[in-house]
Image (spheres, helix red, strand yellow):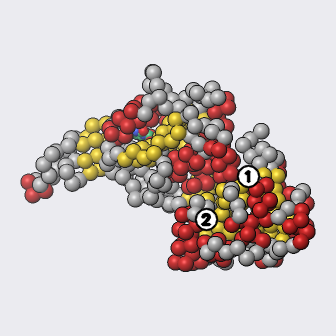
Amino acid sequence: MGTLNEKKILLIISGGIAAYKILDLIRNLKKKNCEIKTILTESAKEFVTSLSIASLSQNKVYENKFDLNNEIEMDHIALSRWCDIILIAPTTANLISRLASGSADDFISTVISASNKDIFLVPAMNVEMWNNPATEENVKTLLKYKYKFIGPVVGDLACGEVGEGKMSSINEIENTLAHYFAKKNNSFSKLKAVVTAGPTREYLDPVRYLSNESSGKQGYEIAKKLFDSGFDTTLITGPTNLNYPENLKIIRVTSAQEMLEQCQNLFPIDIAVCAAAVVDFQPNYQSEKIKKEESSEYNFKLSKNVDILKHLSNHVKYRPKLVIGFAAETNNILENSLKKIKDKNCDWIIANDISDKSIGFNSDNNEVTIIYKNQQIEKISKAAKSEIASEIVNRIIKSLGTNNVRNIN
Ligand code: CTP
């Protein structure tokens, strides 16, 4: 049984077009043996019915009003004590605003203000509403109050516009909750995961360097999901413009050599995910700035950089139990990845097509194919990089069951 087994979820549905998707979520969570009680806002009733939710959840559906019968059977305090978590999906801009202001004037807001449990918000709204300064302030306030956010992600919105505001997929909501409970159970706290991310910079002189366009987003999202699932996670990152959560262990490096040394300092590692776009060559470093007027032509020699993925995969003493590499390809993705997995001796290669600008470098979305050592191939369809990361971490967790990883107990 998975980490969601027998978990009690108080589900609050607020009124948005995405509410209809929650029926699938209820069905999936029930299959995983969750117990679900639901409260519907008045406007949610325009999108889903109490009857459909009651039949899917096989449980009581409350309305957002004080009702003598409700209070006798289970009052707002008892309901907030009954559950393991509260999940509000979809969460509208209006509900976000009411939570940020600390309202306690209806059934939902009293349940929430009386709660001693973690509360997950799954926003869904128009991109302008999400980017509205008032909403932004409210979200900051709610983060300060320790509310947990799932999404939103960038995508096609119900209103016909495109942007950030789309509700996270049902898969992502389930994955996030499963990872949360894995962390709570301390399931993976003894497993050390290391993720490399971002580009490296190889300096020619004090001001010039070789590098690439890697944003670091995919590696960062994987590190975040491993951390959120309770792994002892360290992110080793080259220079990026990303904001990192305070509690994630981060080591900032510049060159490939530094990245390798920091990996070695962390031995023994259980899971290594090499998502960094490491520059393959290293120039001879000149400590004085190269002067362009000295010559109309400048030739510099490049030597091959150490291959961190290969080094980890072939380490005699400290080979991690699971080593995952990435392959950014423009053509012959499968053929090249299968060659790479053999050449590098890693366990999986996660390949993506960088010729498609809507995925890969700098994009918020990705679409990947996982190639396993046994030549099994699995495609993960286009989704936000955070959602792709959840799917990858799910597969890492599944592989632990069969991989006899160090220290797992
Ligand atoms: N990698 C590494 N150290 C290097 C080079 C690559 O750890 N010096 C890792 C990357 O983090 C990634 C994988 O190896 O996981 C990519 O392999 P690579 O052969 O470098 O892929 P490409 O750059 O796509 O190589 P090529 O241009 O030869 O296809």
Q: Position of residue 104 (x, y in %)?
A: 70, 73
Above or below, 406 relative to 45 = above
Measuring 52% from the left and 46% from the top, which residue is drawn there? 223
Residue 303 in view: yes
Residue drawn at the location 59% of the way across and 42% of the way down:
230
The residue that mark 2 highlights is 152
Q: Earlier in the sequence, mark 1 or mark 2?
A: 1
Label number found at residue 84? 1
Which residue appears at 80% of the width and 50% of the height? Answer: 34
Q: Are marks 1 and 2 in contact (CB under 8 Å)?
A: no
Q: To which quarter of the image does residue 57 belong?
A: bottom right
Query: In which of the image's four quarters is ligand 1 placed?
Result: top left
Q: Secondary structure at mark 2?
A: loop
Q: Is residue 368 visible?
A: no
The percent coordinates of residue 184 (x first, y second) are: 65, 44
Give the quadrant of the N terminus.
Answer: top right
Some atom of ligand 1 lies within 8 Å of the CB belonging to the residue at label 1: no
- Relative to 129, residue 139 above or below: above
Q: Say if 168 sits above or below 156 in the image.
A: above
Q: Which mark is residue 67?
A: none
